[in-house]
Image (spheres, rainbow, N blue to C red):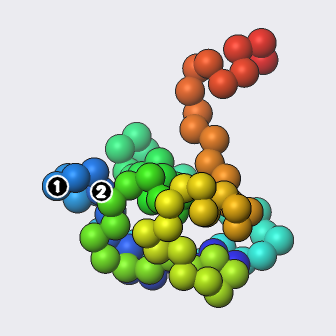
Amino acid sequence: MLNIKELNSGYGRHHVLFDVSAEVPDKEITVLVGPNGSGKSTLLKTIMGLTRIYSGRILFDGRDITGMQPHQVTRLGLAYLPQVDNVFSNL
């Protein structure tokens, strides 16, 4: 299970996420929906350790992964593939 508690994060001094809390149960399909600029990518990057966390906690399978480096997070089984035009150019 992925559990996000009162997460505040952003890029440097630019605060993007404010008190975000969410629970993603095991073996469930979960969708993150919102307009451009609403923080979807920032949330995923923060979970993966790619942005600055100001406060809050991120738990994965009961383990606190708040502030872990990306390579440590991926070793636990989480991955992030950004949507860019050149990911699979032949599709």
Task: Indicate the quadrant containing the N terminus: top left, top right, bottom left or bottom right.
Answer: bottom right
43 w.r.t. 84: above or below:
below
Task: Indicate the quadrant containing the C terminus: top left, top right, bottom left or bottom right.
Answer: top right
The secondary element bearing badge 1 is classed as: loop
Q: Residues within 10 Å of mark 2 (few under 14, many from 20)?
A: many
45 horizontally vs 23: left or right: left
Is the Cβ of the residue at disc 2 closer than 8 Å to that at disc 1?
Answer: yes
- Judged from this view, the residue extending furthest toward the right is 27
47 horizontally vs 35: left or right: right
Label 1: which residue? Answer: 13
- Judged from this view, the residue extending furthest toward the bottom is 62
Residue found 63% across the figure and 77% down from its top: 60
Q: How many marks?
A: 2
Q: Residues within 10 Å of mark 1 (few under 14, many from 20)?
A: few
Residue found 34% across the figure and 67% down from its top: 53
Tell which of 84 and 40 is nearer to you.
84
- Judged from this view, the residue extending furthest toward the left is 13
Residue type (three-letter) at the residue carrying disc 1: Arg
Quadrant hosting residue 90: top right
Residue found 62% across the figure and 18% down from its top: 86
* Residue 71, percent from left and from top: 60, 55
* Residue 67, percent from left and from top: 43, 69
Tell which of 35 and 11 is nearer to you.
11
Residue found 44% across the figure and 80% down from its top: 57
Label 2: which residue? Answer: 10
The secondary element bearing badge 2 is classed as: strand
Tell which of 68 and 5 is nearer to you.
68
Whether residue 29 is visible, yes or no, is yes
7 horizontally vs 64: left or right: left
Residue type (three-letter) at the residue carrying disc 2: Gly
* Residue 6, percent from left and from top: 38, 80
